[in-house]
Image (cartoon, rainbow, N blue to C red):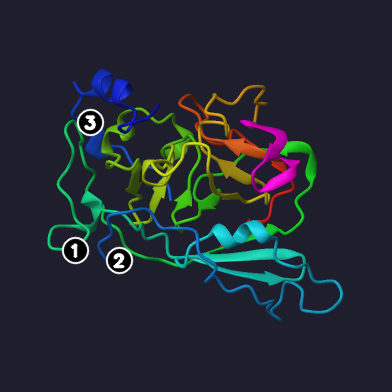
Amino acid sequence: MLTTPLRAVTMGLALTGALGLMACEGGASSTTPTAPTTTSTTTASSGGGGGTGSGSASLPAWYAQFGSAVQVSVDGTDVVLRTTSVPDHPSYYFGAGHASYEAPHAGMQPNQNRIVGQTVTLRVPAAPSMATTPTDTPLGPIGVAINGVVFFNQYAAQRQPLTFEILSFDRHNGHPTPTNQYHYHLEPLWLTQAGRARLLGVLLDGYPAYGPAEAGGAAPTGLDSCNGHTHATPEFAAGTYHYHFTEAVPYLAGCYRGVRGSVG
């Protein structure tokens, strides 16, 4: 269980001072995780991706678990999620003087960046489908958490493995890019403190992402090369493909198993 940002790795890397050169590509104070709400926008839009006619999808019920930091709507056959990727939890990266600032935790080697909200729009299939061939995840946002923070893949800049960069993660396993976009590469500890098996978000192919445990508490088994598998979950009684956070690479998704949407 990741009770601190990969403590074992942190201890093994603490001898280096090179963290400041490592960086991945590119609110009010709160003391508890964002609770699932139903305040997200759920009306269909009439913008360029589709419309509100007979070809439009309806919003799947599980999107009600996204908090108010994410605007959720339907456009044609896509679910559109808009966020500024500002976390709802304390972080060193808010900067001293901010209501949600906290001092670095033991062993943390902060980077020089700060949290700055910037709009990200993800368009994901409302009815996801398996791709003929899985596709690689890019640098930058690959999905979004229920609290509005975007997910990144297992790489640092230039698709290098996450190594020294892990030391810069705050207490909740997040940090900002050089362009100040806050994100998670690893298990979002702020959210999983409410349940390690819970729904945590969605990836760009429309398939959900869950924590590092199954509903009964056991670690997920039978994960494929993309870090997912298919079975029933509390949100999908009939079963669905879904991803899991894990403690080993790729941490969330090594590839998209479904037909991917777009991000902008």
Q: In which quarter of the image is residue 108?
A: top left
Q: What element carries label 2?
A: loop
Q: Which of marks 3 and 2 is nearer the N terminus?
A: 3
Residue depicted at x 40% and y 57%: 34
- In screen coordinates, is 5 left or right of 203? left
Whole-Å distance between the Cαs marked 3 and 1? 30 Å
Element type where label 3 sits in the image: helix
Going by the numbered disc 2, the residue's amino acid type is Gly
- The amino acid at mark 3 is Ala
Residue at the spot of label 1: 99
Between 168 and 229, the one nearer to me in the picture: 229
Highlighted range, magenta: 227-240
Residue 27: assigned label: 2
Q: Earlier in the sequence, mark 3 or mark 1?
A: 3
Q: Are discs 1 and 2 less than 8 Å apart at CB? A: yes
The picture places residue 82, in percent across and down from the top left corner, at: 53, 67
Residue denoted by label 3: 18
Q: Position of residue 120 (x, y in %)?
A: 50, 63
On residue 80, the disc is: none
Q: Which of marks 1 and 2 is nearer the N terminus?
A: 2
Q: How crowded is mark 3: few (under 14 residues within 10 Å), some or many (20 or more)?
A: few
Q: The residue under label 1 is which amino acid type?
A: Ala
Nearer the observer: mark 3 or 1; the answer is: 1
